[in-house]
Image: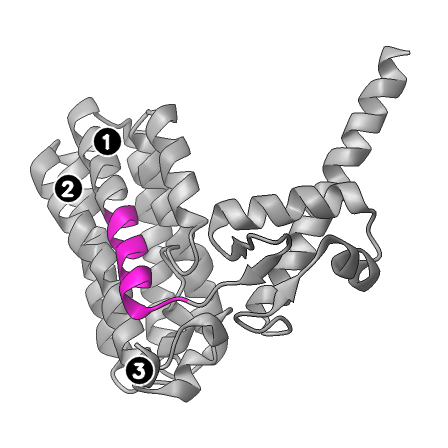
Amino acid sequence: MELALDRDLDRGGSQTVKAQLALRELVLSGAVAAGERLTEQGMVERLGVSRTPIRAALMLLAEEGLLEPMPNGGYTARAFSEREVLDSIEMRGTLEGLAARFAAERGASPHALDAIRHGLDQIDGVVEEALTLLSAFSAYVDLNAAFHRQVIALAGSRTLERQIGRVVTLPFASPSAFVMAQADMPGADTVLIVAQDQHRCILEAIAAREGARAEQVMREHSRLAGRNLSRALRHREALAMVPGAALILPMTDR
């Protein structure tokens, strides 16, 4: 009896995850326009998933900030001002800065530091290729995300890790949210070189157990995403490379 119940719970959970991923893709791909109303029944018919997982997925996306509950029922896809996106980036930077400080002050094993150095060595090669190959930007996204995860893990704080996990689900707040937009903008090489130098400085500060410096550089590093956003908003073709870019209000609407 208990095993059957466990299987039912597992199926329910997997269906909710499936619905959540499908709904997020609809919103971020632009298939659902900002301000468009979403209802449980409409999403059931559109995605072919039963009502209970759809209801849960809609609530989860509302918690993430992608959807806005409507007073008379249903949800709408949100639009975001530049200020809202910058606030999300600043929140992430503040928490990741704290993670870098914890990592420095609490000490990191040589093995963990070597693993990060190896990842940064890989980024060095990718940065060189990114000057000519679009595919290199995708590789950079993965390696950059790994660097941020490793630093957070070094902090040794599950509480902080959970809070950062919540923040990066905010629209456009992740460390690599605007990296792909750089591929279609002038000066991409300079931004990537600066970002990689900051990676090295953060690791150096952690290894030297310089908590204040590690925190300061990590916070400054996060602000590169804000600069990338501002540049992308002036190059709408580049902004189109960012998932969910249609949800960011044009300059004339802010």
**Mark 1 residue type:** Ala
How crowded is the residue under tag 2: few (<14 C-alpha within 10 Å), some, or many (20+)? many
Q: Quadrant of the C terminus?
A: bottom left
Q: CA distance from mark 1 to mark 2?
A: 9 Å
Considering depth in this image, is 243 or 175 the residue closer to the camera?
A: 243
**Mark 3 residue type:** Met
Residue 4 seen in this snapshot: yes
Q: CA distance from mark 3 to mark 2?
A: 34 Å
Q: Which element type, helix, strand or loop, lies under badge 1?
A: helix
Residue behind mark 2: 214
Q: Are marks 1 and 2 in contact (CB under 8 Å)?
A: yes
Residue behind mark 3: 251
**Mark 2 residue type:** Ala
Q: Main secondary structure of the magenta part?
A: helix
Question: Which span is picked out in magenta?
Answer: 80-93
Residue behind mark 1: 103
